């Protein structure tokens, strides 16, 4: 006789009675056994006591707020955490995700969207703790490193009035970072991506992403090309339980017009010759999180003296705050020298001795009067 399936548990941490009641109903429809908590401290204790698989967490609460509650829970729990907040600013969302949340949903929210996001989280099981490294594991890491290096462009971009460079430094634990570029009759195409995970699995996903993105190069509209590519990539990601953050851009070199799509990457900066740097925010979640997702394209113009800088989260992780990250990346981008030298300076923002993730940097600088500015 087969045993009954174990019911999954969830903790709803929310100080508004009506919203808390709605969340309980929504999660019970997904067959969760739900425990309620009216504030952050009670919620942390509930998570400690019942060890749930899922937590929904309000950000604005009396006592400790959701950010602090998330930080405390991450000391002992690997439950999926979905933050719910009326705060819509990009910095608030990043603060929640950087603290350890797995998703961030703004209020008012759609119950169906919440259910879809929860299903998406549970399609991607938490990875098991890594065993002690053995010879076989070392061999896999070595082969994964070879795959990663093969994804990097083998030829330099040679565009009149532009200086383009990229740099990549892997950590001992190989991940899925890569950058790719190639020239077109009008300019160039550029992709920077990070496939979640470690080892050969992440490297192979990155290889698939690179191949698919190159396969849509002839599609005229960047949003149509990205939509077609993401649909193909998502089918592979569903099988592997992964997702990919990606920045993809097309440059028309004559005009300096850069069309781009940011899918959950959020680590690009436009550094103008004059005036403050502008962060290029994400147009939607990473590829593979939600089915049938669409990402709108955006545009900017690289004027003479301007730079486009894209880095990986290994650089962000080396900073205490998003403000420090932006300030230091901008300072490096405005330094003297070539784009190659700027990339080297960007990698130094995450020193090899302390970096816990791969570090990638790409710089596209439009020269001033035919020379590198400064």
Image (cartoon, rainbow, N blue to C red):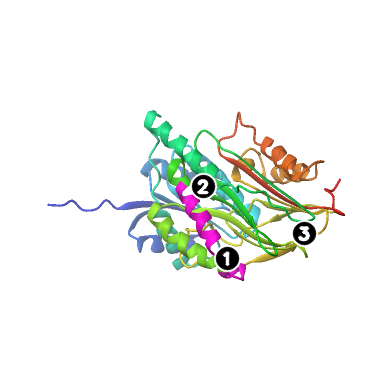
Task: Identify the element where label 1 is drawn.
Answer: loop
Q: Is residue 62 visible?
A: no
Instruction: Tell whether position 207 is magenta.
Output: yes
Q: Earlier in the sequence, mark 1 or mark 3?
A: 1
Mark 2 closeness class: few <14, some 14–19, many ≥20 residues within 10 Å:
many
Number of numbered tags placed on the structure image: 3
Residue in the picture at 44% in, 42% down: 200
Instruction: Tell whether position 205 is magenta.
Output: yes
Q: Which mark is residue 208?
A: none
Looking at this view, is 86 or 214 the one in front? 214
Residue 110 position, x and y percent, is: 49, 68
Mark 1 closeness class: few <14, some 14–19, many ≥20 residues within 10 Å:
many
Task: Identify the element where label 3 is drawn.
Answer: loop
Residue 273 position, x and y percent, is: 83, 53
The stretch in magenta equals 204-224
| Residue corresponding to mark 2 | 40
Disc 1 or disc 3, which is closer to the eye?
A: 3
Side of 158 where 355 appears, left or right: left
Side of 29 where 242 appears, left or right: right
The rendered magenta stretch, by its main secondary structure, is classed as helix
Alpha carbon distance from label 1 to label 2:
34 Å
Alpha carbon distance from label 1 to label 3:
22 Å
Looking at this view, is 320 or 148 the one in front? 148
Q: Which mark is residue 295?
A: 1
Alpha carbon distance from label 3 to label 2:
46 Å
Looking at this view, is 328 or 236 the one in front? 236
Q: Which mark is residue 302?
A: 3
Disc 3 or disc 2, which is closer to the eye?
A: 3
Q: Earlier in the sequence, mark 3 or mark 2?
A: 2
């Amino acid at each position: 006789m087969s045993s009954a399936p174990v019911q999954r548990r969830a903790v709803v941490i929310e100080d508004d009675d009506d919203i808390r009641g709605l969340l309980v109903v929504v999660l019970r429809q997904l067959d969760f056994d739900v425990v309620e908590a009216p504030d952050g401290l009670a919620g942390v204790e509930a998570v400690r006591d019942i060890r749930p698989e899922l937590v929904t967490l309000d950000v604005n609460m009396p006592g400790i707020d959701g950010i602090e509650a998330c930080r405390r829970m991450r000391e002992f729990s690997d439950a999926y955490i979905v933050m719910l907040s009326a705060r819509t600013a990009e910095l608030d969302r990043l603060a929640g995700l950087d603290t350890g949340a797995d998703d961030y949903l703004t209020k008012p929210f759609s119950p169906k969207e919440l259910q879809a996001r929860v299903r998406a989280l549970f399609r991607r099981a938490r990875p098991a703790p890594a065993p002690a490294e053995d010879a076989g594991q070392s061999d896999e890491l070595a082969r994964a490193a070879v795959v990663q290096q093969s994804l990097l462009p083998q030829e330099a971009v040679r565009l009149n009035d532009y200086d383009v460079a990229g740099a990549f430094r892997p950590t001992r634990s190989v991940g899925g970072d890569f950058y790719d570029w190639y020239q077109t009759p009008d300019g160039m195409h550029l992709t920077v991506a990070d496939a979640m995970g470690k080892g050969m699995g992440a490297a192979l996903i990155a290889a698939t992403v690179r191949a698919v993105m190159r396969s849509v190069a002839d599609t005229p509209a960047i949003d149509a090309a990205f939509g077609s590519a993401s649909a193909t990539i998502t089918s592979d990601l569903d099988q592997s339980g992964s997702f990919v953050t990606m920045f993809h851009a097309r440059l028309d070199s004559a005009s300096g017009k850069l069309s781009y799509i940011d899918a959950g990457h959020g680590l690009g900066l436009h550094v103008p010759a004059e005036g403050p740097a502008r962060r290029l925010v994400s147009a939607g979640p990473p590829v593979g999180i939600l089915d049938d997702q669409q990402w709108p394209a955006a545009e900017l113009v690289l004027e003479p003296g301007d730079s486009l800088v894209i880095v990986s989260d290994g650089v962000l992780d080396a900073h205490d705050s998003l403000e420090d990250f932006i300030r230091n990346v901008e300072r490096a981008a405005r330094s003297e020298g070539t784009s190659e030298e700027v990339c080297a300076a960007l990698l130094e923002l995450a020193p090899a001795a302390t970096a816990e993730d791969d570090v990638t940097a790409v710089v596209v600088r439009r020269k001033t009067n035919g020379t590198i500015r400064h």
